[in-house]
Image: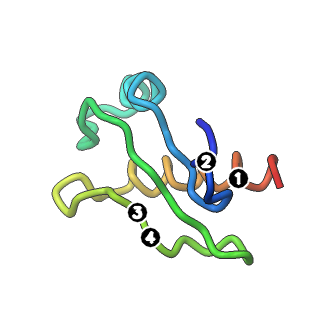
Amino acid sequence: MHKLSGNPNKIIVSRDTVNRFRQSWPCCKLRDRSYWFEFDQSGNLVDTDVPEQDDGPEAVALSNDAKLFWESTK
């Protein structure tokens, strides 16, 4: 994971990280691609590029991992 250059509140989850994450979720709906999550100053999720068909508990868990990363790099 890394922060988007120019926007410290947007976390990019690389394709490799997503694929490792997918291995831990049976029947994972996330695809073989990268995703991003954007948080406001309070840590609330305000935007993401997770398409509706990929949404579910695994997307929520990945966003929580992204938030933990964001918090650790503030």
Q: From what the image shows, is residue 16 above or below residue 69?
A: above
Secondary structure type for disc 2? loop
Secondary structure type for disc 1? helix
Question: Along the line of sight, which residue is nearer the eye, 2 or 50?
Answer: 2
Label 1 packing within 10 angstroms: few (<14), some (14-19), many (20+): many
Question: Along the line of sight, which residue is nearer the eye, 45 or 56?
Answer: 45
**Residue 30 sits in which quadrant?**
top left
Q: Which mark is residue 47?
A: 4
- Nearer to us: label 1 or label 2: 2
Distance between the alpha carbons at the discs numbered 3 and 2? 16 Å
Looking at marks 2 and 4 on the same chain, the residue that comes earlier in the sequence is marked by: 2
Looking at marks 3 and 2 on the same chain, the residue that comes earlier in the sequence is marked by: 2
* Residue sticking out furthest to the front: 6
Label 2 packing within 10 angstroms: few (<14), some (14-19), many (20+): few
Q: Amino acid at mark 2?
A: Ser
Q: Mark 4 touching mark 1, by CB under 8 A?
A: no
Q: Is residue 73 left or right of residue 69?
A: right
Distance between the alpha carbons at the discs numbered 2 and 4? 17 Å
Q: Position of residue 20 (x, y in %)?
A: 44, 22
Q: Position of residue 22 (x, y in %)?
A: 37, 30
Q: Which residue is painted at 62% across and 39% down in the image?
A: 2
Q: Which mark is residue 48?
A: 3
Q: Position of residue 42 (x, y in %)?
A: 73, 77
Q: Amino acid at mark 4?
A: Asp
Distance between the alpha carbons at the discs numbered 3 and 4? 4 Å
Q: Which mark is residue 5?
A: 2
Q: Which residue is painted at 26% across and 30% down in the image?
A: 32
Label 3 packing within 10 angstroms: few (<14), some (14-19), many (20+): some
Q: Mark 3 touching mark 4, by CB under 8 A?
A: yes
Q: Is residue 5 left or right of residue 60?
A: right
Looking at marks 4 and 1 on the same chain, the residue that comes earlier in the sequence is marked by: 4
Q: Which mark is residue 70?
A: 1
